[in-house]
Amino acid sequence: IVPELRPLLAGWQQADSIVVNPHKWLFTPVDCSVLYCRRPERLVRAFSIVPEYLS
């Protein structure tokens, strides 16, 4: 990260997850989001739960 932009990201190192939308910042022509997650195993566990009403 360029030194001039570091103040914009102050505190990000404390976050558990961060979402960035390149389609807004990088002029990506389609909707696109990027998720940075400190503990990806929590996402795997959360999305592997099957609720009773879907069984």
Image (spheres, grey):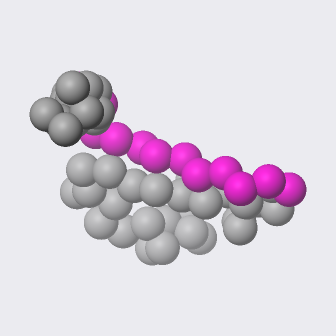
Is residue 52 covered in magenta?
no
**Rendered location of residue 31, percent (x, y):** 71, 56
Taking the image as shown, residue 19 lies to the left or right of residue 4, namely left
**Quarter of the picture holding the C terminus:** top left
> Where is residue 53, by image quadrant?
top left
Q: Is residue 38 magenta?
A: yes
Residue 37 at x, y percent in the picture: 34, 41
Where is residue 24 drawn, in percent x and y? 71, 67
Q: Can residue 35 be seen at all in this image of the molecule? A: yes
Q: Residue at x 36, y 68 (%)?
A: 10
Q: Is residue 1 left or right of residue 39?
A: right
> Percent from the top left, x then y, of residue 9?
44, 66
Residue 42 in view: no
Q: Residue furthest right?
A: 29
In which quadrant of the rendered view does residue 39 lie?
top left
Q: How many discs mark residues in the rendered view?
A: 0
Residue under the point 30% across and 66% down: 11
Q: Compared with residue 30, is residue 52 higher up or lower down, i.e. above or below?
A: above
Q: Nearer the viewer, residue 16 or 47?
A: 47
Along the line of sight, the residue nearer the viewer: 29 or 2? 29
Q: Residue at horizontal 48%, vertical 73%?
A: 8
Q: Nearer the viewer, residue 4 or 55?
A: 55
Q: Is residue 18 above or below residue 50?
A: below
User: What residue is rendered at 59% in x and 70% in y?
Assistant: 4
Which of 53 and 10 lies nearest the eye of the viewer? 53
Q: Is residue 1 left or right of residue 23?
A: left
Q: Which residues are magenta?
A: 29-42
In the image, residue 15 above or below residue 4: above
Vertical placement of residue 43 versus 35, above or below = above
